């Protein structure tokens, strides 16, 4: 069992940061846990940030929403949250791979950090541990990664205006 290796530390990044959160409605109990944890953590470590939330039907719809945000808003970071639970077919793996590939492409093509916390888990217990637990919480990790990337991009923009 791994725990978060990203430390919590408040960050003063100057101007207000826009961290857009995209969360799937599918497996809502778990995704809502991720979302609440991410929002709470972001509010603590980026207190001047705006945190618009966009809910989409499922994990497969997250990338198109992320692309729209990347192209049409002033988002500084996008956080993608979803839970895919494996079944008896390869469908979950196909969805997870497609979503991961698309999110990485959106990040690199738009030069915009996209934090991928669309989790592929084997069962409900793994989902519960990672989304609702306090020992391992991927929503907290997503928030800390988003804050770290927001901070990095502030530095990059200063170094390479």
Image: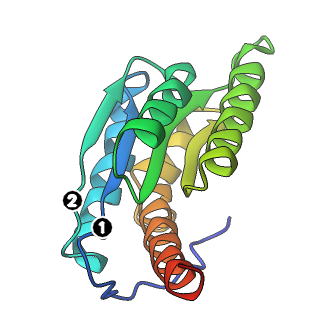
Q: Position of residue 19 (x, y in %)?
A: 34, 57
Cα gap from disc 2 to disc 1, whole angstroms:
6 Å
Residue found 48% across the figure and 60% down from its top: 142
Front-lying residue, 122 or 66 = 66
Q: Which quadrant of the figure has residue 87? A: top right
Residue 50: numbered disc = 2
Would residue 11 appear left or right of 103 to someone viewing this image?
left
Q: Position of residue 53 (x, y in %)?
A: 27, 41
Residue found 76% across the figure and 12% down from its top: 88
- Report the residue marked by disc 1: 17
Q: Which quadrant of the figure has residue 37? A: bottom left
Residue found 59% across the figure and 47% down from its top: 110
Residue found 23% across the figure and 67% down from its top: 49
Q: Is residue 23 above or below residue 107?
A: above
Residue 143: numbered disc = none
- Disc 1, SS: loop
**Farthest right residue in view:** 90
Front-lying residue, 106 or 40 = 106
Would residue 130 appear left or right of 11 to someone viewing this image?
right
- Disc 2, SS: loop
Would residue 12 appear left or right of 149 to someone viewing this image?
left
Q: Position of residue 29 (x, y in %)?
A: 34, 33
Q: Is residue 13 above or below residue 72?
A: below
**Cβ–Cβ below 8 Å for labels 2 and 1?**
yes
Front-lying residue, 89 or 124 = 89
């Amino acid at each position: 069992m791994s725990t978060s290796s990203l430390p919590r530390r408040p960050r003063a990044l100057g101007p207000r940061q826009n961290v857009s959160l995209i969360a799937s409605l599918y497996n809502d109990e778990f995704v809502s846990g991720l979302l609440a944890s991410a929002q709470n953590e972001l509010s603590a470590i980026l207190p001047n940030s705006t945190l618009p939330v966009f809910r989409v039907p499922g994990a497969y719809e997250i990338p198109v929403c992320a692309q729209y945000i990347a192209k049409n808003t002033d988002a500084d970071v996008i956080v993608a949250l979803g839970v895919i639970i494996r079944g008896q077919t390869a469908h979950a793996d196909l969805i997870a791979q497609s979503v991961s590939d698309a999110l990485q492409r959106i990040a690199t093509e738009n030069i915009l950090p996209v934090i991928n916390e669309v989790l592929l888990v084997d069962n409900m217990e793994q989902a519960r541990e990672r989304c609702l637990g306090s020992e391992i919480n991927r929503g907290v990790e997503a928030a800390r990664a988003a804050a770290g990337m927001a901070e990095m991009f502030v530095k990059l923009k200063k170094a390479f205006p």
